[in-house]
Amino acid sequence: MKRLYIAYGSNLNVRQMKTRCPNAKILGTAKLKGWELLFKGSKSGSYLTIEKKENAIVPVVIWEVDKTDEKALDRYEGYPRLYGKEMLEVELDGKREKMMAYTMTEGYAMGVPSEHYLATIRTGYQEAGFDEDVLMAGVEKSRERMKQEMEAERMEEAPWSQQLPL
C-alpha cells in the first residue's frame, strides 16, 4: 500500500532519500500552512521539526512511499521515540489531502543544527527550488529560543541573591 509523505528537512535531499527509500517517488511540492520550522534535540544533535504557528508556511516535497520505504523512514526518524507521525492536510493538484509527516515528540530542547545536517537540508531546498531564507529563519529562531531557554534555566538554578538587582 502506498502513502503520501511530506518532507520538510533532510528528506528533501533527493540523493539521500533515494538511497534510503528506493521505491519513493516525488509527486510535487506544496506549502504547509499554519506550521513553522524549528530545530530541537539533545546533546547528540539538533534536528528539524515543525510546530503549529498561525500565518507561518513551511515548503514541503510530497513523496509517495510504500511500506518498505516507510519502515526505512521510521528507522531514520527514530520513530516513535524521537519523532512521531501526524496526518496533516496539504493541497495537491487543487485538492486537500491527508499526508503523513514526522514531528518531533515532546521534551526536546531548542538547538542549532550541525553544519553537515544543515548542508544536507540546503541541498534539498536548492533541488526543490525553495527559498532558503525560510530555512535560515528557522535556524535563527531556534538559536534565539535556545538562548532564552538557557537563560531561564540559569535563572532557576541561581541562588536568590544572584537574581536580585543590587
Image: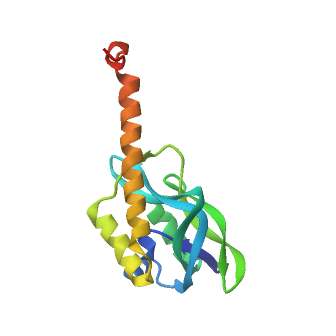
Q: Nearer the viewer, residue 139 or 113?
A: 139
Left or right, 41 with reference to 52: left
The image's colour scheme reads rainbow
Q: Nearer the viewer, residue 142 or 121?
A: 142
The residue under the point 70% across, 76% down is 97
Residue found at the far left of this picture: 115
The residue under the point 52% across, 60% down is 36
Q: Nearer the viewer, residue 58 or 19?
A: 58
Residue 16 appears in view: no
Residue found at the far front of this picture: 166
Total residue callouts: 0
Q: Position of residue 163 (x, y in %)?
A: 36, 19
Give above or below for 32 relative to 156: below
Give above or below for 68 relative to 26: above
Residue 133 appears in view: yes
Q: Position of residue 74 (x, y in %)?
A: 51, 65
Q: Position of residue 33 (x, y in %)?
A: 61, 67
Q: Quadrant of the C terminus?
A: top left
Q: Position of residue 75 (x, y in %)?
A: 47, 64
The residue under the point 70% across, 84% down is 94
Q: Quadrant of the N terminus?
A: bottom right
